[in-house]
Amino acid sequence: MWIPPGDYRLTSSLNGVQNVTLQGAGSWHSVVHTSRFIDQSSSSGGVHLKDFAVIGEVTERVDSNPDNFVNGSLGPGSSVSGMWLQHLKVGLWLTGNNDNLVVENNRILDTTADGLNLNGNARGVRVRNNFLRNNGDDALAMWSLYSPDTNSSFESNTISQPNLANGIAIYGGTDLAVKNNLISDTNALGSGIAISNQKFLDPFSPLAGTITVSGNTLVRAGAMNPNWQHPMGALRVDSYDSAIEANVSITGTTITDSPYSAFEFVSGGGHGYATKNVTVDGATVRNTGTVVVQAESQGAAKFSNVQATGVGAAGIYNCPYPAGSGTFTLTDGGGNAGWSSTWGTARPGRSRARATPTPIPPATSPRAAPPPPPARRTSTRPARRSTATRAPTGSPPTTPSRRPGPSTSARPRPSGASSSSCRPPPPGRRARRPCRCRAAPTARRTRRWSPRRATASTRRPGTRRP
C-alpha cells in the first residue's frame, strides 16, 4: 500500500494488519497525524512499515491508553524502517509474537514513555541504527514479562536525553545483547545502560544464559535518583528482585564525563541479592565524577584492561548493603590502571572520608554496612503494560512507580549499623554538558541553507528546503 506525499489524519487505530507493506514517500513527505496507529494483540506477520512519519498529539502519559505507533503484535517476519515517530506515548510497545522482527533506521522522538519496549516473548528481534531522543522512560527496553525475551539485540543505536529512566534497559531475559550503542545525557532515575532483574510484575523471567554488553559509548550518563538521593552509575548491574545468575560480559566500553560512577553493582530493592558472574574487559573511563566502581551488593566481578583518567574521588567504593549480606570481590585480571584507590571509612573527628590506595582485589574481610538508602518510592509506578489499571484510591499500589517524587519516609536502619561505619558514596559533580549557545551573526552575515546544517535528523517532517 502506497502512501503518497501529503498530510493525512487517521481517526481510529488499525487492527487486523497482516501480510502487507505500508510505504510512504519519505518521512518528510508522507505524514500521518494520529496518536494510535496499529493496535492489535496478534497477527500472522509479514507486516512492513517504512518511509513515512506518524506525528501524535500526546501531551500526558496515561498508561491505560494505547497511544502508541504500534501497540501489540506485528507478527513474525515483520519490519519497521525509515519511520519518523514523534509526540506519542510509546513508539513501539511489542507483545505477543514478533519473532525475527527488524526495527532499523527510525527516529523516535518526544515520547511520554518508552521509545521501544519488547514486552516479553521477543525471539530473534533486531533493533538497530535508530535515533531516539527525549523519551519519557527507557529509550529502549526488553522486559521479560510472562515469557522471556530471547536471542534479541539492541545494536548501533543513538540515544540522547532519556528523561525518566535508562538509555537502554534489560529487565530479565535469556541470551541478549547490547552492542555498539551511543548513549548520552541521561537525566533522572537511570543509567546509560541497566542490566537488571527488576521485575515490576509477575510472572517474570530473570536474566539467564549470556548477556553481552559490547562496544558501547556512554557520555554524561548516570544520574542522581531524587527519591533515594542516591547516585546511579553510567552502567548499572542490578540484582533488584533476585540474584543475577547469568553470565554478564561487558567489553569495549567507553565512559566519558559521568557525573557519578562508571560501573555500579547494586541490589536496588534493598534485599542484598548477589550480582555475580560479571566480567569487564577493555574499558576507557574519562573524568568520572566520583568512582570507577560503585559496589553496593554482594557478588563478584573480574576487571581487565580498564584504563581510567580524571577520576573524581577514588577508584573503588565497596560497601555492600544491607549489613551482613556478604562481600563484593573485585578480581584484577591485569591491564588496569588509574583507579587503584578506595573511598575509605570515616576517621574519628573528621567529616570527610579519605581515599587510601589499596590493591585490587580489596581486602577479603567484610566491610561494615553502608547507611541504607532512603525508602523505596511510595507513588504508583505507571503500569508497564498499557492495558493495566490503576490502583483504587486508598488501596496499596499494584506496582511501584517510576515517576519522580520525594520519598515520604526513610527505610529503618538495620540494628547494629552505624552511620559512620561506611561512608556514603562521594558527592558527584555536575555533568559537563556542551554549550548550546552560539554567537549572534553580524549584520553583514546572512544565514544560507546548507545541507550540512539542515540534516535529516534535525528537520521536522513536512518542512521544505528553501
Image (cartoon, grey):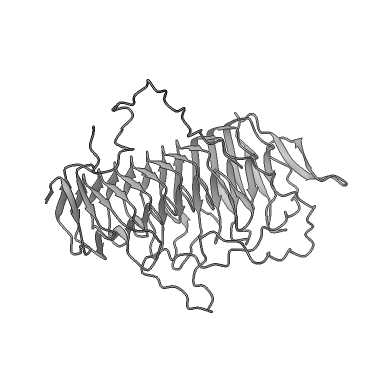
Q: Residue furthest front?
A: 443
Residue 128, above or below 327: above
Q: How many labels does the image show?
A: 0
Viewer-proximal residue among 47 and 283: 47
Residue at (49, 68) in percent of width and height? 399
Residue 325 appears in which quarter of the rendering? Answer: bottom right
Q: Is residue 321 visible?
A: yes
Residue at (54, 39) in percent of width and height? 280
Residue at (80, 62) in percent of width and height? 416
Q: Where is residue 326 in the image (x, y as percent from the top left)?
A: 68, 55
Viewer-proximal residue among 54 and 190: 54
Q: Is 293 on the left-hand or right-hand side of 61?
A: right
Viewer-proximal residue among 397 and 207: 397
Q: Quadrant of the C terminus?
A: top left
Q: Is 51 on the left-hand or right-hand side of 370?
A: left
Residue at (80, 52) in percent of width and height? 420
Q: Where is residue 166 in the image (x, y as percent from the top left)?
A: 48, 50
Residue 219, above or below 114: above
Residue 465, above or below 71: above
Q: Position of residue 437 (x, y in %)?
A: 48, 33
Residue 186, above or below 315: below
Q: Which residue lies furthest to the top in this view?
A: 444
Viewer-proximal residue among 396 and 74: 396
Q: Can residue 77 be seen in this view?
A: no
Q: Is 289 on the left-hand or right-hand side of 416?
A: left
Residue 14 appears in which quarter of the rendering? Answer: bottom left
Q: Where is residue 415 in the image (x, y as percent from the top left)?
A: 77, 65
